[in-house]
Image (cartoon, helix red, strand yellow):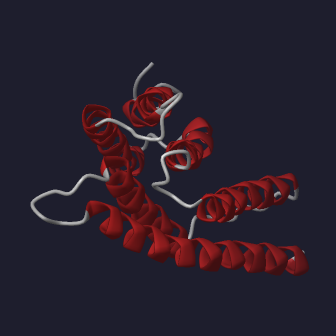
Amino acid sequence: MTGNGRLNPANLLTLFRILTVPVVVLLLYTPGTRDISFFRSVAATILFTVSSFTDLFDGYIARRYGMVTSLGKLLDPLADKLLVCASMVMLIPSGRVPAWMVAIIVGREIGVTALRGAASTEGLVIAASPLGKAKTILLSIGVGALILNYPVMGIDIHLLGMLFLAAGLVLTAWSGLDYFLRFVGEIFKK
């Protein structure tokens, strides 16, 4: 199907993002060692980056060409969460990401998903906020840099990734609180 069908170009981009998750995970999987080789880091970075960029296009295509579907509304935020969270979890054993940061980010993602689910059972829609979108961008840049991790032209890529991840962590907490407050506000309006 194309056009307004479920498997329109926008949804195919989202599905591509979901299908790249296991490949990125396999590239970052390092049994018996803490180190991720340079080649695997570069390959995972390229795939993660290409996959992350599809998020910029799937929503634009869906809105621009009238291809917004319920499937797309469900899968798009899920694809972002899967890609970022799975990648971060895989970076814990190599010491590239502190586990406590991953726990906060994954906890927020589960919490917001639960809030959206609860809202939908009440007939409410809690749309993505600019905070949430900014959080996704910062986390994607940070995680992408931490996947690469090796210095590039004298730039400490790990430090750069941690700076973006820290900024993303602040927005993670802030946007999670924003979702919660908007949910409570919508409940009290009823």
Seen in the picture, residue 53 relative to 145 is either above or below; the reply is above
Q: Who is closer to the viewer here, 180 or 155?
A: 155
Q: Residue farthest to the left?
A: 153
Q: Position of residue 181 (x, y in %)?
A: 76, 80
Question: Which residue occupies 48% across, 74% down?
Answer: 166
Residue 37 visible in rendering: yes
Q: Position of residue 51 (x, y in %)?
A: 36, 40
Tell me how many marks there are.
0
Quarter-of-image position of residue 184 = bottom right
Identify which residue, 88 or 178, lies in the foreground.
Answer: 88
Rendered residue at 67%/78% (across/down)? 178
Q: Residue at x 64, y 75 (%)?
A: 173
Name the spot of residue 64 as percent of width and height, x first.
34, 50
Q: Position of residue 2 (x, y in %)?
A: 40, 24
Q: In which image quadrant can residue 101 be found?
A: bottom right
Give the image quarter of residue 17: top left
Query: In front: 17, or 170?
Result: 170
* Residue 61 appearing in the image: no
Q: Is 43 located above or below residue 158 in the figure? A: above
Q: What is the quadrant of the C terminus in the image?
A: bottom right
Q: Residue furthest top?
A: 1
Q: Is residue 142 above or below residue 171?
A: above
Q: Is residue 125 left or right of residue 59?
A: right
Q: Is residue 85 left or right of residue 162?
A: right
- Using the image, determine if residue 119 lies above or below residue 32: below
Residue at 45% over, 18% down? 1
Q: Nearer the viewer, residue 13 or 145?
A: 145
